[in-house]
Amino acid sequence: MKKKNVIIMGAAGRDFHNFNTFFRGNKNYNVVAFTAFQIPNIEDRRYPKELAGKLYPKGINIYPESELPKLITKFNVDVVVFSYSDVYHKNVMHKSSIVNASGPDFWLLGPKSTMIKSKKPVISVCAVRTGCGKSQTSRKIAQYFKKKGKRVSIIRHPMPYGVLKEQIWQRFATYEDFVKHKCTIEELEEYEPVVEMGMVIWSGVDYGEILRRAEKQADVILWDGGNNDFSFYKTDLNIVVVDPHRPGHELKYYPGETNFRMADVIVINKMNTATKQGIEIVKANIKAINPKAIVIEGDSIVTTDKPDLIKGKKVVVVEDGPTLTHGEMTYGAGMVAAKKYKAKTIVDPRPYAVGSIAETFKKYSHMTQILPAMGYGKKQMHDLEKTINAIPCDTVVVGTPIDLSRWINIKKPSTRVHYELQERGTNNLNKILSKIKV
């Protein structure tokens, strides 16, 4: 059988996992290239031989996605595999049309082809969109098992933005680990809150290797998903978070709708700040699409460590970057806190943005009164620092889930915003988790 030439389209996450689980070692296929989209500084790299395996002794080149039609012709490609998340359904089909018009098949690999089986019980926390509140849900689950005296290995969806052969597997238990692995802001947003709880979180590129190491230190595996991707592991309990601030999105984005349909438990988060109409739309979609799912209603409780720095002050609000950019939110927890604690004025950060931050505002024009905490590497972190310090304000309200002042030099008073999941009613996570045999 002649080998089929393959290109994998991705964004430094699902693409590498799809390769590792389906194509690496598969002699029926020849992966000729990856293409990269969405994340700065990940194109023009190489998937290293240390990860690519024996069939790829030179590794595999990574190209900009904009070159896809040219690459299809150059490498005589038979199959293109779409492998990234949080994409509007219509845009997925635009990608398919580009590929099919050039000749190749267009593939979406599913759970059976890509999920890895664990020796330990696996609970997954996924979502229908970026920024629904997966991490606060994961933290609550981790705390439940910790109180029961059980060891939890939290495994986070990949964010390998550095040197890939140095990120085959990563274990984060201390702040020194963040420095050692040269974490970006986007990585810190997921890892730092877990380490603050006194727990361990794993990440990297090879999720088979990560699982083998994590299992040795765990009674239960907790998959903390990224964007709206589905789990890399076969799950015993699939928890999916939805956001009534973006009602209907659970049926409009890939692969969020996949998660919505597969969910054992659906958490409706942020109900305390959503509209009644938004909540009703989400509930109606659950009833129509996945009526067997257990529904947990929840609030996202927002607090701050220094409310006096907000009340009556002129503030700039810094929010979680991915939630605002490809998550398409117009505000986050920082804005909720600014209004809750009665800020006098919220400063528009756009006139003061520099470098890559200014480019981000151009690309994502829906953002107005909020500053995304973009930090994909040192240069962008420096641009963020310069932008914040140029804004004429009394206080910086940090809505991203990390202590931002630890990682960049903020020359103004700042206050950190915290947000936690609080369930309503009789259905709650503790009740559901008590049925898991660990």
Image (cartoon, grey):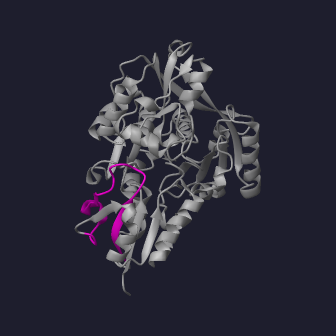
Using the image, determine if residue 148 lies above or below residue 405.
below
Using the image, determine if residue 54 lies above or below residue 149.
below
Q: Quadrant of residue 73?
A: bottom left
Residue at image x 60%, y 50%? 128
* Residue farthest along the bottom direction in this orientation: 1
* Residue farthest along the front direction in this orientation: 351
Percent coordinates x, y for residue 9 in the rendering: 42, 63
Camera sees residue 107: no
Q: Is residue 39 magenta?
A: yes
User: Is 47 on the left-hand or right-hand side of 157?
Assistant: left
What span is colored magenta in the figure?
29-56
Residue at image x 36%, y 34%? 354
Residue at image x 57%, y 40%? 329
**The one of 160 and 396 positioned closer to us in this rendering:** 396
**The one of 28 and 362 positioned closer to us in this rendering:** 362
**The one of 333 and 192 positioned closer to us in this rendering:** 333
Q: Is residue 32 magenta?
A: yes
Quadrant placement of the N terminus: bottom left
**The one of 81 and 138 positioned closer to us in this rendering:** 81
Q: How many marks?
A: 0
Percent coordinates x, y for residue 409 in the rendering: 33, 24
